[in-house]
Image (cartoon, rainbow, N blue to C red):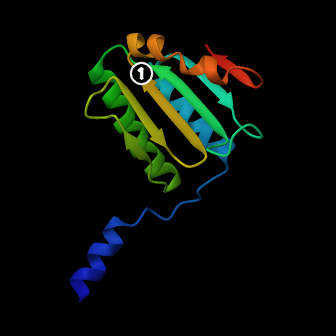
Amino acid sequence: MAANAATSTAKAAPEKDPGTSEELLARIVEFLEEEKAEELVQIDLRGRSQIADYMVICSGRSTRQVTALAEKLADTIKLDFGRFSKMEGKAQGDWVLLDTGDVVIHIFRPEVREFYQLEKMWLPGGTAEIE
């Protein structure tokens, strides 16, 4: 029984302040800039969608970089905010989606991003490209 209790606590998120969606967004953007993600765009979804408060879209130069960015970002969010991120698409590495609840992050290979043009769907009102 004690072993089960130890196992369940090991799987729990670290006790951290989950922060506001704005603090989470700022940390995500900072991380992606530090890790050399390209063509970073943030989109304010508040009042436009109930899926999240913000969306971040960026590109990695290769499948390896896309996957690495997603894995390291998920770890950073877990360590800094105690939040687990749901991740989709990591096995292929063409387009990885991270869902933190308040912020949804899309990391694309450039060709895949150009094909789907996801940001064009969300561009009107509240979009800012980060240089």
Image quarter (top left, top right, bottom left or bottom right) of the C terminus: top right
Q: Dot 1, crowdedness within 10 Å: few (<14), some or many (≥20)? A: many
- Toward the viewer: 31 or 97? 97
In this rendering, position of residue 4 left or right of residue 52 = left
- Toward the viewer: 126 or 8? 126
Residue beneath label 1, please? 108
Residue 38, image x, y percentages: 48, 15
Q: How many marks?
A: 1
Residue 62, image x, y percentages: 31, 16
33 vs 3: above or below = above
33 vs 53: above or below = above
Secondary structure at badge 1 equals: strand
Residue at 34% x, 34% y is: 89
**Any part of residue 56 in sight:** yes
- Toward the viewer: 82 or 39? 39
Residue 21, image x, y percentages: 66, 46
In this rendering, position of residue 27 left or right of residue 128 = left
Residue 107, image x, y percentages: 44, 26
Residue at 44% x, 53% y is: 84
Image quarter (top left, top right, bottom left or bottom right) of the N terminus: bottom left
Residue at 53% x, 15% y is: 117
Q: Where on the picture, by quarter, is residue 12?
A: bottom left
